[in-house]
Amino acid sequence: MASLQGDAVLERRVVLLRAILDTFASAAAKRYEHAKVARHPTKIRMFWGDITQQYQLILEGQWSRLCPKNNELLIGLLGALESIFRGGTVSIAEECINASFPRLETLRQIINGVLANDTAGLSHLLRALDEQPAQSSRTNLMEHLRQLADVLAGDEQQSIEAESTVFPQVRRRLAPFLLNMLAVVSNHWTCKCALPHRAALFMCTHRHVAEEDSTVTIHGLLSTKANEIGWHATSMNVDTKRSQVRTRFDLPASTSIPTRRKIRDLCSTIENSATQTLKLDLDGRKLLQLMSSAKDNSSPPDMELVSLANGLFALQETELGIAGKLCLCIVLSYSMLDFCGEPWFPAGWTNSGIHFFQDNKVLRLRPMLVTPVQPARDTLSTNSVVMPSLLLSHAALMMEIYRQSPLSKYELTRAAENRITYRAFLRSSLQDTNWDVHERFKQAVQSCLDISEMEWVCGDAEVEGRLDSAFCQRVIGMLLSDFTAICGAIEPDVFISSLCLPRVESSSDNSKTPQLSVEVRPRINSRVTRPTPSPKPAHLRAHSPWKASGGRPAVEPRESGRSTVSSLGLSYERFFDTDEVVSVEQIRESGLWFQRFDEVKAKMPRMTASSHQLKIAILDTGIDLENSWLSCHARRIRCWPDAGSCKDTDGHGTDIAYLLLRLAPEDVHIRVAKIAQSRFLRNVDILAIAKAIEHFSDHRGEKVDIINLSFGFAIYKTPELRPIWLAIRYARDNGVLIFAAAGNEGANDGVAWPAKLSDVVCVSAANSYGRPAGFSSGEGHRVWTLGVSTPTCRTDDKQRIIHRSGTSFSTPIAVAIAATVLAFMEGLGNEKDLLVPQDCEDLKSRLWTKTGMERVLCRTCVPSESLEHRLSYITHVPFLTMSAFSRLGIILNELRSVPEG
Amino acid sequence: MASTRKTYFLAPSWDIGPAEIALGSVVANPKVPHRPLSAGTLPDDIDSAIVNTPPADKCSGFAKLSGAWSLGLFATFVHFVTLGGKLAHSRKSASEIRYSCDTMGTRRFVPSSTYVTKAAHDKGVQAFLSMGGPGSEVFVITGIKTGYNITITTSEGKDVASAAQLGVDIPIIQTTVGPKAEHRSESQQEHRQHIEGPIVFAYQLERLRQTRKGAISNSEHTSGAMLGQGATGEHHDNQVEIADTEWTSVALEGLQSALVKGIDEHEDEQDCSIVVPDIVE
């Protein structure tokens, strides 16, 4: 590690050390006070135990291995500490004579019980408390602390004492302060609203509140009407020195001199405020509105609260980068210490109890606590203790944030009934999670679980303090360590303020509690008419060179919807064919499936061609036009940009093309774009994929009706995959259906991206009897079809047809079925005996939407006895065997229920 | 009812030798006769007489095409491989092509039902028919025409008048705006190519079609003889029949080919049909 030098490395160490020193100083001060007062052997042992634990960490190189410079400082610090005891109160044990710091070592061994039951040892410890070091020793120690503080903060003016003393003090005072402050504010809400108004307060680490800085700025929102929508941005400056609350609301800082106006009813004041921010000043028990002379023509922005569960998991399609996840966990960890007691999170310290806010563009990732603004209670909550159960909830939360998906709600609920089973479940989930290279993240979660097993006695300050200390050190310290390794010295509070994800939209927010009004907007997935092509996405208009990020992500604040990822993680991207060996029985069964299709098709009159040439685009490994079977269907195939660039050297794309040509109506043509050399998507060009989607979505290119994507990515990462996401949106807006493979990881990895997108028809694989294939992802998604042992147009060296399995192959089959539906609807004009309703033309366009097509497929291509099932196993047969009259009626009925876009 | 007019497919290029297109082999794509589906040993099972037409005298002439005159089979081949594309409106219609061929030969056979059955049971053929299901077709090569010592001379740069003498219809472009460009080249570039051969320049095919058992009577190709059974694999109860031997424009549409009338220079200038592949961009 000696090679790890330089500014960035130093900064990283500095933040790490600072975090640990904070904890160390906090614990030392607390224990010292307890030990001095009590003079109980256990308390004394505990006090020195905390100190010698740090000493041992330094000696074992857990600090010094990182940076030689810091190592030197730390050793010097230990030397200074050793010199404190040279007054003779701590005599050196024989075993410790040869130690580098014999007195510290003696203390450590006494603490560790090596010299237990030794009254002399205990007396050593007791005397050490009363140690009155020489002035020179004290000066030496303080000098070392000062030097270390300079290194840590990079600021000659900052003292370690100020940092270390203020840190715990402010933290413990913050929660009561806020309660008091909100109580005062509540007195000025004299409205008759049915429910109490709410404050949504931003959480932060509060690590930079110094003693001389008398105010703490708490940012947040205030609700306009309790039972309606609307929040006003505020910032609350809390005076940390005064015992009496003095709070001022102002946002942002204004250069003009404000005048103040007394507020009688805060509700109407907020309601009538036309400015972007309402500025209030709370002085004692008076609430005043700051009237700035500067013009503020901006209107209040639309703000909406979204639970973490929805904003980050359920409704969020963008993946948060690892730095953002770490930062979020750091802020939440600090906040948990602040607000671990009542009344802050009545919904629990869970993904539904914590909120974000979003405007009409982006979701801000600063976590918020939402609390009612109510009068002061007789007894303020002083329960700010880290309890084991809370630690378990926090471990679950951190794990969910890392995975960016919730743990099984059922399992959580079941396990949470018993702390032991809950912990066991979380440990199991911990092991099941793929932590990749983020070992420290994992260790933080694991430590959280470990600490929850430590002895805990309600009301025992020592025990509580030990838990606090361990949590800061082993959980927050570990997260900070990883965070600084990625982002350098940037403060988590600064970083979290800049973190955004795309706004989420939903028809309901599951986390919404009866007390909380949250603005919701209906999600619109469909359109009434096929829209005209919209302008090209910006990224496609200007094709800037793109390359996958392989190194450290930028840490600069991002504007909107741009989170960071550490790397593209190529090992996760793939086409979804399995390596499973196909059995003879499976081949026979899939043969019967095709035979049944052929039989039904043979009995059906050929669908009449329409003026609209249906086209399907395949984005895959290309196509082998020299393949004997495909060469006979060359008239239905066109490559983009040309045949030479689409030569398939893998076979995957050829197999997909075969299934489409085989199962789609004969008038349907395919378009091929090669987006990968092999099925493993190595060296995949994301921008090329996006360009291909855009080309096939636009009349300026060659617009198709359906795009087949038999590949996917384990997770969505921005900015790497953003071009594809934008292109898919572009396709959707232009009335192009996208079908994507769900993935072959079963329930292990969940549905792949982009199949999980709400704009994409996710296709899962089943065997020929309609039973879900074991490998197939897609639980919770509707469309399933044959994906086991599907034939190809290639043979092995013994002239046997190669069969393959995977959602890769169920996808083109589903696409072919969809094309059959489209062909029927497009050929209606040629059906002489069919009475076509007048609204048919209007409704027809809804088939080119994900919702419309999925509903029709699940209604007309599923055996009637299976219609009520959640999973729809679709085949051609039910559709083709239905009379045209019934088909049309059912399709139009389904389309009528599709919301208009 | 099958027509007595023979139908020939033009070879896709002038560098395919007789060894590459085996009489009796089964192919998937009529336009790719040199890539058989069947095993290389299948032609050894031909159990009917193979007719070898004696070589004719040297033939030569211009490659020309018009509505009134039928072009010879070999001339059409020369025109196709030289200029490519559809013959009606060649983009190089101002070129003149002269050719000569010292010797031509023809080998053909009429496959017996036994042979067709064997062909249908060939593993490669079975696999291919399985891929497409009922209605899938394969083609048995039943005739091959070869040529030796061929010389093709192409003259380019002739003006419209001289090109018209070739009998090719030249579309007259009417322009209403701007000057009318007219280019008459005094010079003439001549390119001569000699192909020693032998090469295959045309071939005949017999269509075999897979059909579902019991569904033959419904087929539009009722004239086809059912010859193979279980040909698409043991699990499929399918059969193979010889489809109507008549090649129609409709049937060739899927093959992106055009059917033109011609004469067989080698065999008494009999009328024949010539399948000319389109050039696929």
Image (cartoon, coloured by chain):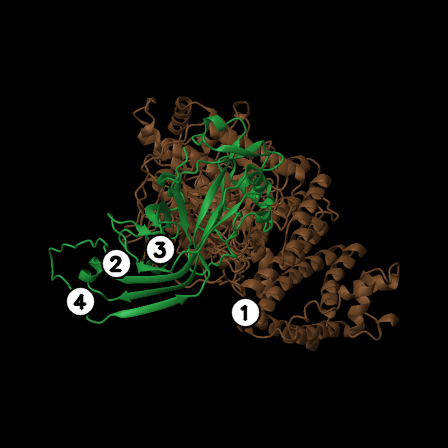
* Parent chain of label 4: B
Taking A733 as reference, is A65 above or below it?
below
The residue labelled by disc 2 is B93
Question: Is residue A548 among what the camera can see?
Answer: yes
* Visual hue assigned to chain B: green
Say what amino acid the circle numbered 2 marks: Ser
Taking A717 as reference, is B155 above or below it?
below
Q: In this view, does A521 lie to the left or right of A97?
A: left
Who is closer to the viewer here, A5 or A372? A5
Q: How far apart are marks 3 and 4 (CA)?
A: 50 Å
Q: Distance between the residues labelled 3 and 2?
A: 47 Å
Say what amino acid the circle numbered 3 marks: Ala
* Label 3: element kind: helix
* Parent chain of label 2: B
Question: Dot 2, crowdedness within 10 Å: few (<14), some or many (≥20)?
Answer: many
* Visual hue assigned to chain A: brown
* Parent chain of label 3: A
Depth check, mark 3 against mark 1: the one in front is 3
Say what amino acid the circle numbered 4 marks: Arg
The residue labelled by disc 3 is A538
The residue labelled by disc 4 is B184
Q: How far apart are marks 1 and 2 (CA)?
A: 90 Å
Q: Position of residue A637 (x, y in %)?
A: 42, 47
Same chain for mark 3 and mark 1? The answer is yes
Who is closer to the viewer here, A652 or A740? A652
Q: Dots 1 and 2: beta carbons under 8 Å? A: no
